[in-house]
């Protein structure tokens, strides 16, 4: 009969090789059960990892409330893990809890001011609450500090949308044109450029 350490190791390996989110969650529950019987088996870093991975599995299933609960459990063991804060923010965003999501992204940026995921997702959340100027600042910081101007069309696209929402049509047009330089078949950029041209012609 396996001892609790062996049981935990077995389920840890099972969770690693299993690709089904529901089965992963079942594995994590087995590990946490063995930990509850003998808390000395795993250190805080490992337990934080288990709760965090369980949260990711729930987020894949679209169960974001449960995901947030798991990320909170993980953060109790490792409060300075930027991935945990970012993943929690993404789940909160998907729940429409934008202010709470922004708090999470700011926690990440307090630790790592150039974190790509936090800057991008903070921009998305700011746009959803109508703070388009601040959203543009996030996207601009991504371009400026991380030198990714020619890599990610999505950032230029979101930046263009923010400018369009502010009525800054010339700046929006520049962003959408940059998108098409990177991805000539980007449907959103093509449609928004058509719409911008109609607006500019009407205003012209």
Image (cartoon, rainbow, N blue to C red):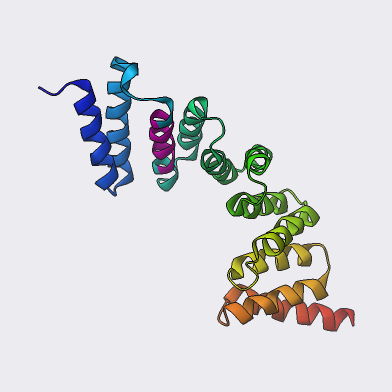
State yes or no: residue 26 in magenta: no
Q: Quadrant of residue 147?
A: bottom right
Residue at left offset 14%, top offset 24%: 2
Residue at left offset 51%, top offset 35%: 68
**Picture coordinates of residue 166, whole percent (x, y):** 82, 62
- Identify the magenta region: 46-56
Residue at left offset 72%, top offset 63%: 144
Query: For the view shown, which residue lies furthest in the left direction?
Result: 1
| Total marks in image | 0
Q: Chief secondary structure of the magenta span?
A: helix
Q: Nearer the viewer, residue 194 or 91?
A: 91
Q: Quadrant of residue 66?
A: top left
In the image, residue 185 above or below residue 35: below
Residue 102 relative to residue 78: left or right: right
**Picture coordinates of residue 37, whole percent (x, y):** 29, 15
Residue 116 relative to residue 21: left or right: right
């Amino acid at each position: 009969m396996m001892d609790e350490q062996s049981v935990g190791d077995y389920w840890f390996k099972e969770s690693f090789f299993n690709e089904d989110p529901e089965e992963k969650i079942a594995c994590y529950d087995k590990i946490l059960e063995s930990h509850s019987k003998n808390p000395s088996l795993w250190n805080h870093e490992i337990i934080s990892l288990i709760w965090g991975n369980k949260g990711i599995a729930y987020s894949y299933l679209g169960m974001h409330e449960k995901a947030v609960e798991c990320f909170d459990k993980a953060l109790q063991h490792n409060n300075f893990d930027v991935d945990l804060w970012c993943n929690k923010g993404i789940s909160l965003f998907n729940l429409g809890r934008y202010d709470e999501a922004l708090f999470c992204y700011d926690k990440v940026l307090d630790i790592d001011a150039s974190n790509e995921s936090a800057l991008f997702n903070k921009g998305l959340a700011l746009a959803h609450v109508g703070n388009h100027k601040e959203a543009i600042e996030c996207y601009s910081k991504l371009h400026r500090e991380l030198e990714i101007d020619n890599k990610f069309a999505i950032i230029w696209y979101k930046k263009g949308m923010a400018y369009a929402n502010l009525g800054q049509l010339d700046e929006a047009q520049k962003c959408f044109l940059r998108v098409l330089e990177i991805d000539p078949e980007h449907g959103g950029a093509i449609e928004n450029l058509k719409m911008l041209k109609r607006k500019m012609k009407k205003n012209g």
